[in-house]
Image (spheres, grey):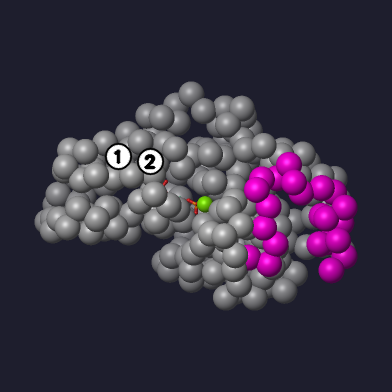
Amino acid sequence: IKKAFIFDLDGVIVDTAKYHFLAWKKIANELDIDFTLEHNELLKGVSRVRSLDIILDIGKIEASQADKNKWLIQKNEDYLSYLVDMNQSEVLPGVMPILNYLKEQNQLIALGSASKNARPILEKTGTLSFFDAIVDGNDVTNAKPDPEVFLIAAQLLGAKPEDSIVFEDSVAGIQAANIGGMLSIGIGDKETLHEAQYIFNDFNEIDTIFIDELIRK
Ligand code: B16
Ligand code: MG
């Protein structure tokens, strides 16, 4: 039996949320906006353009499109500078064993991320070769909670939504999986991700028995 296992990137495969935060914080500081870690939760799974709008809303700032474009470029350049030295040590706990196990079991694996920087991150962390399909921010028009990103991923794998399993750390991503008719597995806080069908703190809590059950479901 083959199932489609679809992974989000930021916050699921790799802890890039901290780098997104640093880069946004820098811009917020320049604009005198008090941007906290709590605010940062609102940006998880959200596109770059939408993230900037949320930050400007927090600061009650109205900006021209030209300024917005400038900040978007600045944010991404800054973000990329934090990724220069990234390597496999930044893959989140328990992820590599699960990817290896899924491959051993001949299961289908895809990426479903909002990020436009997904490929270089997979390359740097040595995880690119695990993925049979990659769908990222360059391939979709509708952001999570729209299920588009996961539906395209399942389609590329030749799997039906009901045979697809999504790992997500964001509320919008869990909603996207549910709306798409897929099994949703939250990675993170139980209260935040309560809409998920299963929730784990991290991949170390997921064992091969659980994966076997998902495959046979
Ligand atoms: P980029 P995911 C999302 O990735 C991040 O959670 C979100 O914080 C970020 O703004 C978004 O990607 C866009 O990323 O600026 O690299 O295009 O969690 O869907 O893998
Ligand atoms: Mg995420």
Nearer the observer, 200 or 154: 200
Mark 1 lies within 8 Å of ligand 1 (Cβ measured): no
Picture coordinates of residue 110, whole percent (x, y):
65, 54
Q: Split into 4 quadrants, where in the image is the C terminus?
A: bottom right
Task: Give neighbour class at mark 2: few <14, some 14-19, many 20+ (Cα, 10 Å).
Answer: many
Please tell me which residue lies in front, 39 or 152. Answer: 39
Q: Which mark is residue 21?
A: 2
Q: Is residue 206 magenta?
A: yes
Judge left or right: residue 143 versus residue 76. right
Q: Is residue 71 magenta?
A: no
Q: Position of residue 18 (x, y in %)?
A: 44, 38
Viewer can see residue 65: no
Residue named by callout 1: 25
CA distance separating discs 1 and 2: 6 Å
Where residue 60 sits in the image (x, y, percent)? 17, 57
Q: Is residue 1 above or below residue 118?
A: below
Q: Residue at x 48, y 24 (%)?
A: 85
Segment colored magenta: 196-217
Q: Are marks 1 and 2 in contact (CB under 8 Å)?
A: yes
> Which quarter shows the N terminus?
bottom right
Which quadrant of the view contains residue 195? bottom right
The residue depicted at 61 percent of the width and 57 percent of the height is: 190
Q: Residue 135: x, y in percent?
A: 55, 56
User: Amino acid type of disc 1?
Assistant: Lys
Residue 79 found in image quarter = top left
